[in-house]
Amino acid sequence: MSSVVVVSSENVDEKQQSLTTSVVQAADKKVNLLGMSRAELEKFFEDLGEKKFRASQVMKWIHQFFVTDFAEMSNISGKLREKLEKICEIKAPEVVHRNYSKDGTRKWVFRVGDGEGSLVETVLIPAEDKTGARKTLCISSQVGCALDCSFCSTGKQGFQRDLTPAEIIGQLWMANYSYMEDVPVAERERTVTNVVMMGMGEPLLNYDAVLSSMQLMLDDFAYGMSKRRVTLSTSGVVPKIDQLAQDIDVALAISLHAPNDELRNELVPINKKYPLQQLIAACQRYLAKDGNESSRRHVTIEYVMLEGVNDHPEHAQQLLKLLKNLPSKINLIPFNPFPHAPYGRSSRNRIIAFQKTLSDAGFVCTIRQTRGDDIDAACGQLVGQVADRTRRAEQWKKKVAQRQEILRTQG
Ligand code: SAH
Ligand code: SF4
């Protein structure tokens, strides 16, 4: 049986970015439509000899009605549905574990490959805000992370691979779907109100896939989210911040964690490549682009509170100076300990004192509530339980042991 499919589709998801390729005869893998942006789907249908508007129809079925069976797409002709069934699929990553906490937090672990460690996590955290009930989904962009921040459990697993667009948007799809599995198609509505790209991985190092997923989040035919409610968090990949400014309008969060280069080099090693001055300048450029747009009025500065490391009054003063010319809101994150972590969480008093210094100087400064502890789903703990198979993790454990030995002999 011959079928029409995109060229070189050994791993179809990964090829979705380049769907400008012509359609050719015969291949046995189906094209996954889940991760395709509108432009990519339009091209896909045109290549099939169909009208472009089929893209928006199919997008609505997939992302708004959570339909994965082409037979249910009632406004598509039977002939086209048959054709689509033969060559395409709508496939979210496989859920291997789910956990719904009493406080409303939900967590999913997805399998995204064959290997033992090929798992990623997604966490949904509910909260009340001025506009009502907020449901924030924390999405992963990579399996592991290459950047090796010293306080981050994901970094300690090393980098395995980038997620495909279908695997990234599939996390949002699955979270929304989880609220309506038993609801009839016509009554289904979306429930995630905010997305933060703050799960595993550095989103700007998987740029194309993250961009196309965020395009779907904002697209009215998919999730139609407000650009203020989609936040990309980065540890500071400066050239990509500039590229992002050109390509899409979403809120930006910076994982700063230290107010001077010496300390930041230690905590967030990418700082050696793109030091603070360059990072702050990139944030200023990001805000300057379409400066009146509400999603770009400020950046969010994330600052993990590590006891005795970056939480001194003097650090707060340095932070004030550093952020003087950058419209920013500061979010203090109590450190989430994980096995063998060489840090402790700053005391509540210390965090409040730090906050006060910043608020007194006029900054909006919040303290992140730690939620979902009962299911190990607090941010920064993602896939803490996943097998750790990299050499880097071994080296790191040795380093921690050495440090503990030094402390023991000193004390
Ligand atoms: N790579 C991106 C996004 C993922 S990390 C980035 O670094 O921004 C998401 C947030 O969780 C970042 O601010 C990160 O610094 C923070 N984080 C990582 N490990 C943590 C931990 N153990 N405790 C608290 N926050 C942590
Ligand atoms: Fe990677 Fe972000 Fe963790 Fe750093 S904090 S290792 S950039 S996931």
Image (cartoon, grey):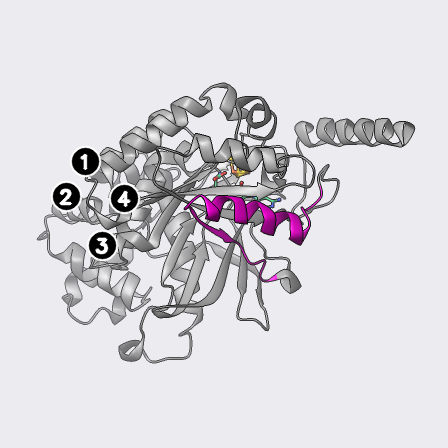
Q: Specify which label sits upstream in the sequence, 1 or 4.
A: 1
Q: CA distance from mark 2 to mark 1?
A: 7 Å
Asked whether the residues under the numbered discs 1 and 4 touch, taking CB atoms below 8 Å apart as contact, a structural biologist would say no
Q: Nearer the viewer, residue 116 or 37?
A: 37
**Residue identified by numbered label 3:** 219
* Mark 2 touches mark 1? (CB < 8 Å): yes
Q: Disc 2 designates what residue?
A: 47
In the rendered structure, are the residues bearing label 3 and label 2 in contact, judged by CB atoms less than 8 Å apart?
no
Question: Which residue position is annotated with label 4?
Answer: 296
Kind of residue indicated by mark 3: Asp
Q: Secondary structure at mark 1?
A: loop
In the picture provided, is 128 more to the left or to the right than 341? left
Res. 394 in view:
yes
Instruction: For marks 3 and 2, give the one nearer the viewer.
Output: 3
| Magenta stretch: includes residue 374 | no
Bounds of the magenta span? 344-372
Q: Is label 1 in contact with label 3 (beta carbons under 8 Å)?
A: no
Q: Nearer the viewer, mark 1 or mark 3?
A: 3
